[in-house]
Image: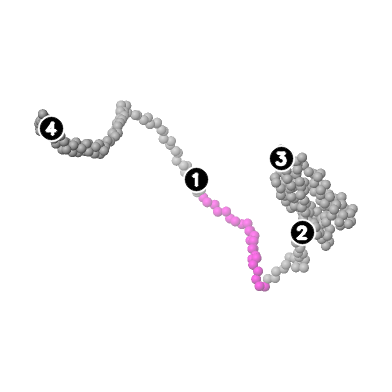
Amino acid sequence: MQVKKNPEVDLNLNSGLYFVFGLTLVLFLTWRALEYKTYTKDDVIVASMDLKDEIKEEVPMTEQVKTLPPPPPPAAPEIIQIAEDNDDVEETIIESTESDQESVIEAPVAVDDIIVDELEEEISVPFAVIEDVPIFPGCEHLKNRDEQRACFQKKIQEHVAKEFKYPDVAVEMGIQGRVYVQFAINNKGYISDIRVRGPDKNLEMEASRIVATIPKMTPGMQRGRAVRVPYSIPINFKLE
């Protein structure tokens, strides 16, 4: 037996049209959803101030200061008396200080009486090549130059050992090293131009102090003339 279908109630009828319509509707709704925009609304607060009472400003009372007018100028005397000048005034004659061709200028000092002092130039001769080395106090009895040179070096070492004092700051910090000292015995026999170079300022200051206490010597001589003699020594600072 064959089943008969009513064409009016067939579900597959116009299914393609319904599909296209539904697809179009979905696409339209999706597009509108994507294009939809929202805007935030700013809350506007309106504030008002009600002044019920008027502000009354109290103006302080001021008193005007009355200034007195200036006093009138003194009146001129009615009679003006003219005093007679009978005193004789000595006139001072000012002579011209300009000289002319006929004036003779006398020199207050004769040219032959002028003595020009020559500037003494300090000559420096190294200790190694000087003829007569500076004589340290205590070496005056020696006449041989080699003995004087050896005595000078010995006395310098003894003086350094006698005056040597390790700086307390350097001891606390454990600083040690060698300080090179350069100085000169000038043509008067005094110590000058002390220069030091070492690992620490405290050691340099102590080395400079030791050398500055060297006593005055007999200056070194070169060709019978007192000269400046540079000299250098190392001073070792070592902690035991």
Residue at the location (80% across, 57% down)? 128
Type of the residue with mark 2: Ser
Q: Tell me if residue 88 is in the magenta stretch.
A: yes
Residue 10, numbered label: 4
The answer to whether marks 3 and 2 mark residues whose Cβ atoms lie closer than 8 Å is no
Q: Tell which tag, 3 or 2, sits nearer the viewer.
A: 3
For marks 3 and 4, the one nearer the N-term is 4
Residue for badge 2: 124
Q: Residue at x 77, y 68 (%)?
A: 112
Prevailing secondary structure class for the magenta stretch in the rendered image: loop
In magenta, the rendered stretch is: 79-102
**What residue would you read off at disc 1?**
74
**N-terminal label among 3 and 2:** 2
Say which element carries label 3.
loop
**Can you give x and y, in whole percent of width and height, for residue 143 in the image?**
89, 56
Q: Does the magenta run of residues contain 85?
A: yes
Q: Residues within 10 Å of mark 4 (few under 14, many from 20)?
A: few
Which mark's residue is nearer the viewer, 2 or 1?
2
